[in-house]
Amino acid sequence: MRDPVKVFALLTALEARAELFAALSDPHHGLWFDFSEVRPYIRELNLFRVRQMTPVLFAAWEQWMPDNPANFVSILRMVSVISFRYTVVSALNPNGLEPVYHEAAKAIISHQAKTPATVFELLRPIYVSDHKFEHDFATLAISMNGQRKKLVKYTLLM
């Protein structure tokens, strides 16, 4: 890229995304000071140790912030619930999450998914059914080693 204007535009876009990327790993990040309702979901996603949802969160942030933050919060809550059901309780392979989240992110960016409800319809294939969730939860066994203690506490208190 030889055009200085394009270079600076790219650097500005990367800087903004880097800030969001860092904030998604830290519920106490400065980005959340005036947006505290996201903190519990950021904590949960970090506790579940999932990252596959990052593209859909980036797309939701870019599409709905700052004009409609409630939509971003809805998407964040949605991916937290999906992550808990899919990854923690049902222990399904997280590789299955990536293509679905990627398609949802593309739909948000292209304005095909205009609401959290339409995003959920795109994420439905990775939403563990209530029947499977109940069965898997009944047989769930979580090791009490290290960081997993917090996950056990979360699961018992949820």
Image (spheres, rainbow, N blue to C red):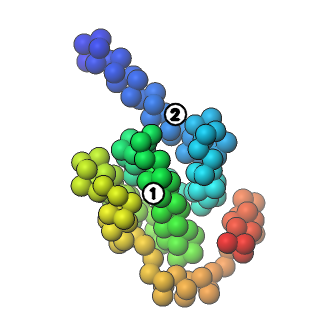
Closer-to-camera residue (63/132): 63
The quarter of the image holding the C terminus is bottom right
Residue drawn at (40%, 70%) of the image: 126
The quarter of the image holding the N terminus is top left
- Label 1 neighbourhood size at 10 Å, few (<14), some (14-19), many (20+)? many
Between disc 1 and disc 2, whose residue precedes? 2
Q: Can you tell which of label 1 and label 2 is closer to the viewer?
A: 1
Q: Position of residue 99 (x, y in %)?
A: 33, 59
Residue 150 - label: none
Q: Is residue 115 left or right of residue 72?
A: left
Residue type marked 2: Glu
Label 1 and label 2: CA atoms lie apart by: 19 Å
Residue of label 1: 75
Q: Secondary structure at mark 1?
A: helix
Residue type marked 1: Ile
Residue of label 2: 19
Q: Secondary structure at mark 2?
A: helix
Total numbered labels: 2
> Relative to 83, is 112 above or below?
above
* Residue 67 visible here: yes
